Amino acid sequence: MDFSIVKKAAFGLAVAASLSACMSTGPALKSSNSQSVAGVEARLPYANYTNYYGYVDQGTAPQGKYKGKDAYYLYAWVPAAVDEIGVSMVSPAASTPSDSDFVNELFSDLHESNPNTFFDTYIVLDRLDILDSAKIKKGGKSLQTLTYNDDSSELPANPGGQSYNSLLRQVSEVSNPTKALVRGVYRISFTSFRGDVEGSFEATVGTNVPGVKIAASLEELHKLVNEG
């Protein structure tokens, strides 16, 4: 037996295992880019992540409709053109917000007493026609829906054991103006097709640029972007 070959194979497997372990830590949301070592394929993380913790209760008014279902919105300001945007939503929120995360007031008020209230997430990503940060509060319209997702096995299962949390990725197409991920405001709509939307959630946006802001209204987003 050629022990040098065995040692090389063992070393390759160890490196692959180490790489896979490193890539599996941190946010479950990973980019569409992947790297293979010794036959092990693993998605690479985004360079920057922004988290938003929210809560929807029975008194929260929906902000729109999606396919006949009540829909709620989050708005994200992306300060520069990006090669890809990733969005995930997990319910209930399983982690604790850090000082750099955006936290809705209802989350602070209700999550601790209702930690296991959750909903099946369905998310939609739209690009709005707001490119100037000074005009965010004036509002705008959706230019087009970029992509959507219902169930993803890449995310942790809900307390019932089902993979009903959502994850989507959109890659920029510079040659196609309708698919180019330019600086501006993006809307994340969320709803549920398995019951009502009620409970806590954690939304995460992954990009390759810092400075992404997330808010539940354009007025709030305007303040975050322009007033800090």
Image (cartoon, rainbow, N blue to C red):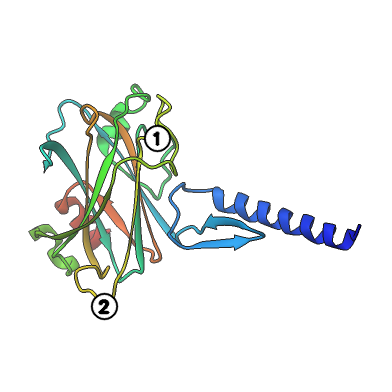
Label 1: which residue?
A: 163
Q: Is residue 95 left or right of residue 63?
A: right
Identify which residue is drawn at 41% across, 47% down.
99
Report helix, strand or loop for mark 2: loop
Residue found at the very far top of the displayed protein: 113
Whole-percent x, y for residue 149 in the image: 29, 46
Instruction: Locate residue 115: give its quadrant.
Output: top left
The mark that comes first in sequence, 1 or 2, is 1
Q: In which quarter of the image is the C terminus?
A: bottom left
Whole-percent x, y for residue 208 in the image: 40, 65
Dot 1 amino acid type: Ser
Report helix, strand or loop for mark 1: loop
Q: Quadrant of the N terminus?
A: bottom right
Label 2: which residue?
A: 175
Dot 2 amino acid type: Ser
Q: In this view, does 188 lie to the left or right of 69?
A: right
How packed mark 2 is, by other alpha carbons closer than 10 Å (few <14, some 14-19, many 20 or more), is few
The correct choice, above or below, for 140 with respect to 183 in the image is above
